Structures are given as C-alpha cells and as structure tokens.
Image (cartoon, rainbow, N blue to C red):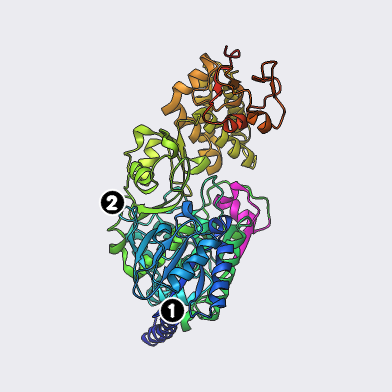
Amino acid sequence: MKATERSTIATAFQEISKRAVAHVRELKQNKPYILVGAATCGRAAGALDVLKTFREEIKKRNLDCPVIEVGCMGHCYAEPIVIIGKPGYPPVCYGYVNPVIAERLVNEFILGENPCPEFVIGALEANDILPSFQDFPRAKYEQKIILKNCGHIDPTDIEQYIAAGGYTGLAKAIDMPPEAIINEIKKSGLRGRGGAGFPAGRKWQYGRDAKGTTKYIICNADEGDPGAFVDRAILESDPHSVIEGLIIAGYAVGARYGYIYVRAEYPLAVERVGIALKQSKKLKLSGSNILGSNFNFDIRIFQGSGAFVCGEATAMANSIEGKAGTPRPRPPRMTTSGLFGKPTVVNNVKTLAYVPQIIKNGASWFIKTGTKDSPGTAVFALAGKIVNTGMVEVPMGTTLRQIIFDVGSGIPNKKLFKAVQIGGPSGGCLPEASLDLPVDFDSLQNAGAIMGSGGMVICDEDDCMVEIARYFLEFTQRESCGKCTFCRLGTRQMLEILTDFTQGKGKLEDIDNLEKLAEEVKAGSLCGLGQTAPNPILTTLRYFRNEYEEHIKLGKCPALMCQHLIAYYILPDKCERSCDACIGSCTVEAITPNKKRIKVIDQEKCVKCGTCLKACPPQYNAIVKLSPPSEVPK
C-alpha cells in the first residue's frame, strides 16, 4: 500500500474517531446518565419496563439525563441491571431493579444525594468513555477482553463503540500487508473459540494460500448448546466487535464477502447486527472502498433454522447454499473448497471478537494473559445449580474451582457440588476431583471434556449423572442429521441403553456394551456432532460408574432423580389432618384423605412431578421421596 493511501486511511479514521469521542462526551460528561441492560436475559427479567419507567420519570421532570439501552454485563443472576453515572460519584451498578426501584433512584439519587446503597451490587471506576470494574467481589478473578464493552455501550450506536477504541484495529490492519496480519494472529497463539481450539492464524493462512479469486469468511454464530448463550450476548451487546474482526479476517485472507450465520431464534441479535452493519457501511467501515482504500468487503446475515448440526462448518455451508444442513466428507477442507465451492474460512463469534484487540494492541499484549499453549481468556456461560448465573471472562488457566466458587459464588441452598458439564451436549461431565483443573483447551481435552461454545452447567447432589448423560444424548440424537450410520443408529442405540438404566431395566453387561458403542460412534461418525456425542457417556462412565451400577444392581437412583425409580409417600405420623396443601397441588388428583384424614398417594395415578413435596409446609415435612420405590411407610 502506498504512503498516500495510508495517510488517507489514517486521516479518514481520525475524523470518525474524533466525532465519536465528542459524541460520547457530550452524552455523558458533566451530567447524570442511566444505562439499562436490555439484552435477552435482561428483557426476560423485566428490563423493558424498567427502561420505560426511567424514560418517563426523566421526561416528566424535564431532566438532562440520557437513558441508554445497553446489552448484557454478565451478571445475569441480578437482572435487570442498571448503571447510574453522576458527577461526584463513581458509576454505580444496581441489581434486581424493578419499576418501583427505578422511580426511587430518580427521586433519591438523580435528583438527590442518596445513592440507595441497599440496591447496589458494585461500583465502577469512573472514566469519560468506558468505566471499568472497581468494587465487584468477583472482579479480581475476571479479565475482560471481548466482554469489556458489554453492558456499557449502546449496541445500536456505532459512535459509542468507536469512542471506546472500536475500529482502531481495522484502521491499523488496512495499513498492514495481509501476510503481516496473519503472522500477528499466529504470534498471538489465538485458538478458535468454537470448541476445537484450532489455531486461527494457521486457518487464515490456509485460506490465504488457497487458489481462487473469490473467497468467503463465515462467522459461526449458530450457538445451539443447551446452557450456552455467550455468542448471543456478544452479538446483542457489542455487535461491532464481531463485524470488525470479520472485516479484518476478510482483508487478511483476501475474501470479498462475509456471512454471519446466526440462528433465527436469536431475533434481538439479528436485529442489532443488522443495525450495526448499516451503520458501519454508512461510515465506510464496511462495503466498498473501506476507509478510502481499495478494499471492498460486503457482509450478509444468514438466519439458520436452529439445526444443531449446522454449527459444523460444512453443514453450515450447505445451509447457506439452500441445501439440507448435512455435513460433507473431508477432504477437501473448507479452506480449499467451502461455500459455493470456493475457499472459505469459518470462525466463531468469540474468535473474531478477539481479532481487533490483538491487531490494535499486538500479539505480545495478548500472550501475557492465559497459558503458553492457550493464551488469552476463556469466556463461559454459567448455568444450572450455581448462585451467580451469567457470563464470565477469566484468564486461561483459571481453575474450575475459582470459576464456580469464587466467580459464581458456589452452589445454592447449601447443596454439595457434584459435577460440571463443560462444552454442552458434546462436552463432558467432570467430578469434584477435577475442580483444581486449569481451564484451557488441552487440560479439558485430557480430562474428557471440551471448551465447546462456552456452556458450563453445574450439577449438585440432587442430579443423577446417568440421567444427565441420557438428557444430553437425547438432544444430540434428536439433532443428528442421519447422514452417517454410526451417528444415526449408534446414538439411538446408546439412548435406548441409557433409558433402560434410568428405568431400572439395565443389565451389568450393558455398561461395557455402552462404553464400546460410544467409542465406535466417536471413531466412525462423519462430523463433530457424532464424534463428540458420546462424551457425556464416556466421562460419566469414567467418573461416576458407581451410579450406573447402583441403577442396575439395586434398581436405585442415588440422586432420587430418575422418575421410574422413585416414589412419593406421606408419613402418617407427620401428616397434619387439617392441612390439604398436597391435595390442592396435585394436578392428577392422586392424593386423597383416608378415614382419619391422613392423606395417601395413589401410586398408580402419581406422575412423580414432586409438586406435593414442595407444597407440604416445612413445619410438617410429611412427604418423602424414596428410591427404590417401596411400600407405604408405617
């Protein structure tokens, strides 16, 4: 690139950046402002009502106080979340906000001097553009790189993203030779965050070296794992970070077109990405002659129909082409013959979101975080039996114990930790003995799990690992495209064996048959779905074999979870005759009083939903759950 072109690019971006910073300072400086987290998690908790209340109260009082809709900050357990900045105070973060609290915050903090500490969950370090965490209990364990903007900027306002440093990486990249960009990504050691951990720089090099003038980049946002929601949250909260990374990847590889493949079940993500693309094109940051250069890169959104198998690269390419979403045999690799038969590079949302930061700050900056073989951070969606659900971003090498107990605050209701399912239905279940395992690609793989899409589902003492394995296998079996025999028939047969175990019909020899079949399905399947579907089985057999044996030998579910192996009974000496709480709660009318007004459960009618157990007043504690089912206690 000629020096004059570099000068034009730098000047063009400086003007855009200057306007963006002025816009944000005018928006927030020397006056109060209110940020309301309204990503999907916030909306589900009532954030839109909170947003409406703030806007009405501010308008009613004719205050100069912008109310800004932002994305997810990660503390999903405390939604709706609100951040209020006011001159003289650090930005204050509030949790569990409702319209009543919102009105009080306007009256007492915006108009007065009472920050209402009873609703505060943390404080942030003041900054003109982007505040950072200061007084959050878990902040010392986290290091936010790709989540740093989430919950702090309006995802529909490109100038807020630019003012926070956005598109600086793109402006710098277009001044660099494509090979230099690829080398920088290689030096950074960035590994794909879609699950497999393949080196991103090496994949880009394959795409760059592939023959052909037409090439494609696909952003894989087809996040379908139960319990995973990080990709969705990033697209909803900071879409420009992904778009910027996609454009840099296109420039480095020599691609002309990019696709963002996102499932249609993510309507808010689709909407915000669409807005972001229009804004970037308007400012000449995407489309034709980006920043005045001769580089052209058009991005299109493709909405998938929710098939889990379309998260596999070749199945995704078939889907975009209008074909059935089934995987293709490999070779050839996607980087040789992918979308429409052209060289194609596929990267995950999180992978692309790292790229602008690496180009902007340099590979040496990135490798200071994490481990030697897994540099950078790990981003997880904490779900299941954990106090603080939500998104976390920690340095690679952080232990599972630190993530679950220090960041996630442990298991609720004083229950005991049992296992953590990492990597969704394709991942593995790791026991308490693995809590001090450092989280990185290789350590997880050696333990039988994978990083996956970043789902981390916590199980406590009330979870049955045989049923957990059955649940996840049922998902993958249902999502199998059926193209290859091992996956189509093997997952069905494994599911039948697991179902027998949970119903007390299994045989001891079935354990060995299940293990052998799992290994064969793993080795013989065509794509990643079938190759990883046995992981929950293999890890639960490895770490919780005793539970399988108890289901078979004793017809017993130790966790009291498998419905066919449990029964509910009412203890006659504890049942209060005047109390009919259990009768009123039973939807199938399985509970009736006897002549002495002691309630009795008809085991033929009982569907074992457990509603009666929850309805029984704690002072009586008259209902018990037993496994194996036995006669009515006397």
Give the position of the C terminus as an image quadrant.
top right
**Residue 407: percent from left, percent from top:** 37, 49
Pointer 1 residue: 24
| Amino acid type, residue under disc 1 in the picture | Val
Observer-nearest residue: 608 or 204? 608
Image height check: is 633 above or below 75?
above
Does residue 222 appear in the picture of this structure?
yes
Q: Is residue 304 magenta?
A: yes
**Residue 368: percent from left, percent from top:** 27, 58
Residue 600 sits in which quadrant? top right
Does residue 253 appear in the picture of this structure?
no
| Tag shown at residue 37 | none
Mark 2 Cα-neighbour bin, 10 Å: few <14, some 14–19, many ≥20: few
Observer-nearest residue: 8 or 4? 8
Give the magenta part as a residue range.
300-322
What residue is at 54 percent from the left and 79 percent from the top? 288
N-term mark: 1 or 2 = 1
**Residue 401: percent from left, percent from top:** 34, 41
Total labels drawn: 2
Residue 136 sits in which quadrant? bottom left
| Tag shown at residue 372 | 2
Observer-nearest residue: 139 or 10? 139
SS class, disc 1 = helix
| Amino acid type, residue under disc 2 in the picture | Lys
